[in-house]
Image (cartoon, grey):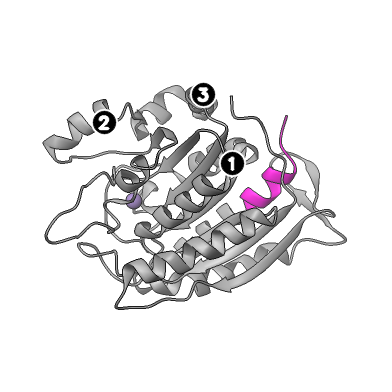
Amino acid sequence: MAGKKIGYRFALIGFPWDMGASLGRPGARYAPKSVRDALKWFFNRVKDGKVFDVETGRLADLTRVVVEDVGDVEVFAHDTLKTFDAAYRVVKNVIDRGFKPIVIGGDHSVTYPCVKALHDSAAGKLGIVQFDAHLDLVDETPHQGRYSHSSEIRRALELERVEKVVQIGVRGYNYPFHYHDVKNFNIVQLTPGDIHRLGTSSAVETVLRELEGVSHVYITVDIDVLDPAFAPGCGANEPGGLTPWELMEILKRLAPYADAFDVVEVNPLFDPNGVTASIAAKLVFDFIVYSSNPLD
Ligand SMILES: [Mn+2]
């Protein structure tokens, strides 16, 4: 199985791109700033390299942790491929320097160049854990093109060594052709119903079992995996999602296995109290704390 990779070096990368939200609501370009602002509240609790993790009753040790904010990806609004190439180079560079990239999108299309950077940086098979309401398996279409926020997992599956995709929180109704895609690509899905019935521990066990054959793991969180009641500031409404606790609990357990992480589709234009940005910031902070201080 993909082993634990306890990480101490993290690179924050903003990716203010929402031109892939072709059928959704634009506005995710503003998320890197909102999430960075919310993240300050969490880092404010770190004193002398320690933070009290109240839920586990432990002092998490962050003395060795380095978080380098490398700024935002350069965006060329008229040119998706040029923008994605810029992102690819930024992400690949931080991986090659021994950092775990933490990418703050942007709409979900931004995940593709980031997965490709991990794929090209590391030999061996790659697994993707995708928290999402939707499947994002749409192939090229006249209206959305090839690189929209509905296609990034499809594009990632075309990479030579992407071996396994596990989708968590997918739900609702979708196109009939996706029924066949899920089978053809051997995608594993855990719906919100599965999580509610089985519990988060069982879900984590399932994910880790499915990742047994891969050597590298990319975790992507589309914030619409949460129920819209908890995360109104996102690209699309899809009722019946996970609770924040379920998402955080699963992510905390998977974080030490991940080589790269992103959180996408936060949309500050629909986030009146900043609550969605706060959840995204919490996920980033959890990722840092639990990558460097695994539970077991
Ligand atoms: Mn998505």
Query: Sequence order check: which comes first, mark 3 or mark 2?
Result: 2
Residue where numbered disc 3 is placed: 213
Q: Image quarter for residue 142?
A: bottom left
Q: Nearer the viewer, residue 74 or 283?
A: 74
Determine the residue positioned at 46% across, 49% down.
Answer: 115
Quick check: marks 1 and 2 in contact, CB under 8 Å? no
Look at discs 1 and 3 and give the one toward the viewer.
3
Q: Nearer the viewer, residue 73 or 278?
A: 73
Q: CA distance from mark 3 to mark 2?
A: 19 Å
Q: Is residue 283 visible?
A: yes
Q: Secondary structure at mark 2?
A: helix
Residue where numbered disc 1 is placed: 258
Q: Is residue 53 above or below residue 274?
A: above
Q: Secondary structure at mark 1?
A: loop
Residue where numbered disc 2 is placed: 182
Q: Is residue 271 visible?
A: no
Residue stretch in magenta = 285-296
Determine the residue positioned at 40% across, 36% down.
Answer: 168
The three-letter amino acid code for the residue at tag 1 is Ala
**280 sits left or right of 179 in the view:** right
Query: Sequence order check: which comes first, mark 1 or mark 2?
Result: 2
**290 sits left or right of 238 in the view:** right
Report the quarter where the C terminus lies. top right
The three-letter amino acid code for the residue at tag 2 is Val
**199 sits left or right of 41 in the view:** left
